[in-house]
């Protein structure tokens, strides 16, 4: 059902980065978390915020985020069923990371889809 999980991180340099990235890897997870930072949303509200995500993919990503403790899912006993998603305390602790990603993305949005040219001044000096 879900993706393969790391059973243990070996504490080598970078393992904390690996652990953090493992929680938010997935095409839409960071975007979902970003939209939930503002307020609680229902499934279709999230889907409207992210029009390119399929229903199946959104469902899977939400399940994984819930399994990892980043979001909370509240089901109301009514017909038709009502389900709301919100950030958990752990998910809210990701806010500075998500805002840093947004700031970096805003500053570099012009590079999206374009090849990056790296100038190697050391080879020019040789």
Image (cartoon, rainbow, N blue to C red):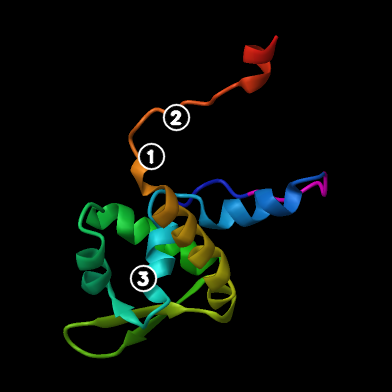
Residue 11 is covered by the magenta coloring: yes
Choose between 114 and 36: the one closer to the eye.
Answer: 114
Residue 92 is covered by the magenta coloring: no
- Callout 2 secondary element: loop
Which label sits on residue 32?
Answer: none
Q: Which residue is identified by label 1?
A: 111
* Residue 20: percent from left, percent from top: 63, 56
Q: Which residue is drawn at 57% across and 81% down?
A: 89
Alpha carbons under labels 3 and 1: distance apart: 23 Å
Q: Which residue is identified by label 2?
A: 116
Q: Which residue is identified by label 3?
A: 35
Question: Which quarter of the picture shows residue 35?
Answer: bottom left
Residue 8 seen in this snapshot:
no
- Farthest residue in the top direction? 126
Q: Nearer the viewer, mark 2 or mark 3?
A: 2
| Image position of 59 (left or right of 90) | left
- Callout 3 secondary element: helix
| Image position of 66 (left or right of 111) | right
Which mark sits nearer the N-terminus, 2 or 3? 3
Q: Which residue is drawn at 31% across and 52% down?
A: 57
- Farthest residue in the front direction? 125
Give the residues drawn in magenta, as a range.
Answer: 6-12
Which mark sits nearer the N-terminus, 3 or 1? 3
* Residue 64: percent from left, percent from top: 47, 60
Q: Which of marks 3 and 1 is in front?
A: 1
Dot 2 and dot 1 residues touching (CB under 8 Å)? yes
Q: Which residue is drawn at 38% across and 55% down?
A: 28
Choose between 5 and 115: the one closer to the eye.
Answer: 115
Alpha carbons under labels 2 and 1: distance apart: 7 Å
Q: In this view, does 56 lie above or below 111?
A: below
* Tally of marks: 3
């Amino acid at each position: 059902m879900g993706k393969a999980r790391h059973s243990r991180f070996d504490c080598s340099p970078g393992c904390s980065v690996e652990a953090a990235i493992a929680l938010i890897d997935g095409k839409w997870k960071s975007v979902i978390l970003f939209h939930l930072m503002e307020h609680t949303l229902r499934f279709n509200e999230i889907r409207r915020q992210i029009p390119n995500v399929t229903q199946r993919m959104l469902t899977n990503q939400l399940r994984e985020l819930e399994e990892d403790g980043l979001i909370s899912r509240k089901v109301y006993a009514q017909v038709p069923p009502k389900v709301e998603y919100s950030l958990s305390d752990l998910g809210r602790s990701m806010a500075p990371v998500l805002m840093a990603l947004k700031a970096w993305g805003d500053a570099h949005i012009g590079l999206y889809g374009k090849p990056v040219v790296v100038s190697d001044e050391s080879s020019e000096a040789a």
